[in-house]
Amino acid sequence: MIKFIESQQGWAFSFAPKDIHCILWGLGGFLVDTRDLPDDALHVLNRLNAPPRLIAHLTLVHDVTTEILKSLDAQWQNLPLDKNAVLFGAATHDIGKVLHPDELVGPGRNHEQDGPGLLEQMGIPADRSRFARTHGTWKQEATLALEDIIVALADTCWKGKRDEELESNLASRIAGLQGIKEWEAFIALDEIVARIAAHAEERLAWQSQFNR
Ligand SMILES: [Fe+2]
């Protein structure tokens, strides 16, 4: 269980497994109740001593990914998806920023190249480490799975950003799998993403309190 708790002095947040505990004393904010990161992702973050801002960002994107998966399930049953892989991918996608901390607060894509190798050094297989690259390179990679596109979408819409090419890509895959028209899939997906993007300001304000 991850808890982000506001106290008079600032932020306290604690993680499970129980060996990760972090207390931040910063500016005040508001309580954000987030879903747990997967244990295997938390284990990696703990071993790498990931910075608080990275953990906060991964928590938000993982949370949004959970929302997307729930909404996809409600709309289209039986999409062939490895949900555990998607959730692990969301929870670790920016892990390369451990090696490139400047990219936590500024632009840069070195983390996309170095992220998978870092995860593999931690014993994570390539079919799980790839998300650390594909969340940023999905436009350039010809053969990506539905799972990669969902992580890329979560990493885009959590902050209210909409990307028509990305959403069309996902809609066209869903349409093919469900035997429906692409525009039907696009409209339903548009509603799902709009609903999630509507809460972007709260997420951005919350993440901005973790400045490193
Ligand atoms: Fe990200």
Image: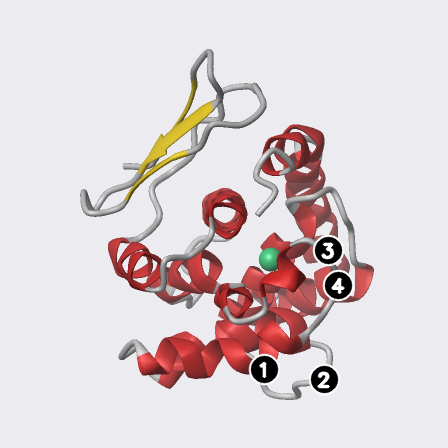
Asked if ligand 1 lies within 8 A of label 1, the reply is no
Is residue 126 at all visible to an observer of this figure? yes
Instruction: Report how far apart the C-alphas of labels 4 and 1 lie in the structure.
Output: 14 Å
Instruction: Report how far apart the C-alphas of labels 3 and 4 lie in the structure.
Output: 30 Å
Location of residue 71 in the rendering, given as x and y in whole percent from the top left corner: 52, 43
Location of residue 137 in the rendering, given as x and y in whole percent from the top left corner: 67, 77
Amino acid type at circle 4 is: Pro
- Give the mark nearer the N terminus: 1 vs 2: 1
Q: Nearer the viewer, mark 2 or mark 3?
A: 2
- Give the mark nearer the N terminus: 4 vs 1: 4
Q: What SS does tag 4 mark?
A: loop
Residue that sits furthest to the left in the current view: 18
Amino acid type at circle 3 is: Phe
- Residue hosting label 3: 186
Asked if labels 3 and 2 touch by Cβ distance under 8 angstroms, the answer is no
- Residue hosting label 1: 113
Q: Nearer the viewer, mark 3 or mark 4?
A: 4
- Residue hosting label 2: 140
Q: Residues within 10 Å of mark 1 (few under 14, many from 20)?
A: some
Instruction: Report how far apart the C-alphas of labels 1 and 2 lie in the structure.
Output: 13 Å
Location of residue 159 in the rendering, given as x and y in whole percent from the top left corner: 70, 43
- Residue hosting label 4: 107
Q: Nearer the viewer, mark 3 or mark 1?
A: 1
Q: Residues within 10 Å of mark 4 (few under 14, many from 20)?
A: few
Instruction: Report how far apart the C-alphas of labels 3 and 1 lie in the structure.
Output: 31 Å
Q: Is residue 140 left or right of residue 174?
A: right
Q: What SS does tag 1 mark?
A: helix
Q: Nearer the viewer, residue 167 or 5?
A: 5
Residue 169 position by quadrant: bottom right
